[in-house]
Image (cartoon, helix red, strand yellow):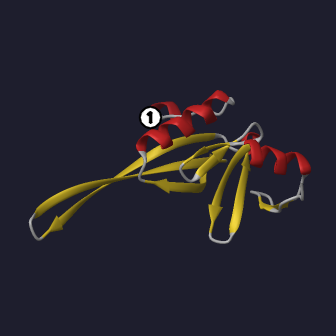
Amino acid sequence: MAERKFAGVSGPVESAAVTADYEAAAVYDKVRVGELGVYYRDGFKTRYIAFEEMDRAFIRVHGVRGRLCCGQAHYEYYRIVFVRDGKEIADVISENEKATDAALAQIAAHGVPTGFIGEEAAG
């Protein structure tokens, strides 16, 4: 198996272990969650964020009300957002709520804090 080149947080990543993890990672719509980190497509690049490089991950829901000729429709988009050093370093958009929830649960299983942090707790 040839090594793939991934765009990491700190620069390009070329590793046989990361390539093998990418191939074996579970697929949740547009996100792959492996044992080493999270993978997703961004244009022509495949991004890789190691679990050690993220402080937190959460889902942001964006609701849109569409006005159509015959009424209204409500659409929801789900973004998995990755945080490092208090800054949002990446997000992946999806229309599939179940896949997004499952991906976040898998990320949490690898020890990454997930969910909402209120103003009081953020300090």
In the visual, does 79 lie left or right of 84?
A: left
Residue under the point 46% across and 54% down: 94
Q: Position of residue 78 (x, y in %)?
A: 43, 50
Whether residue 42 appears in this view of the structure is: yes
Q: Which residue reaches farthest front?
A: 1
Q: Is residue 10 above or below residue 81?
A: below
Q: Amino acid at mark 1?
A: Gly
Total numbered labels placed on residues in the image = 1
Q: Is residue 69 above or below residue 64?
A: below
User: To which residue does mark 1 refer?
Assistant: 118
Q: Is residue 104 above or below residue 77?
A: above
10 Å crowding of disc 1: few (<14), some (14-19), many (20+): few
Q: Is residue 88 above or below residue 108?
A: below
Residue nearer the viewer, 38 or 28? 28
Q: Position of residue 43 (x, y in %)?
A: 62, 70
In the visual, does 83 lie left or right of 75?
A: right
Q: Position of residue 52 (x, y in %)?
A: 76, 40
Residue under the point 78% across and 60% down: 6
Residue nearer the viewer, 97 or 62? 97
Q: Secondary structure at mark 1?
A: loop
- The picture quadrant where one finds residue 108 is top right
Whether residue 86 appears in this view of the structure is: no
Residue under the point 48% across and 37% down: 101
Residue nearer the viewer, 121 or 60? 60
Q: Position of residue 68 (x, y in %)?
A: 15, 68
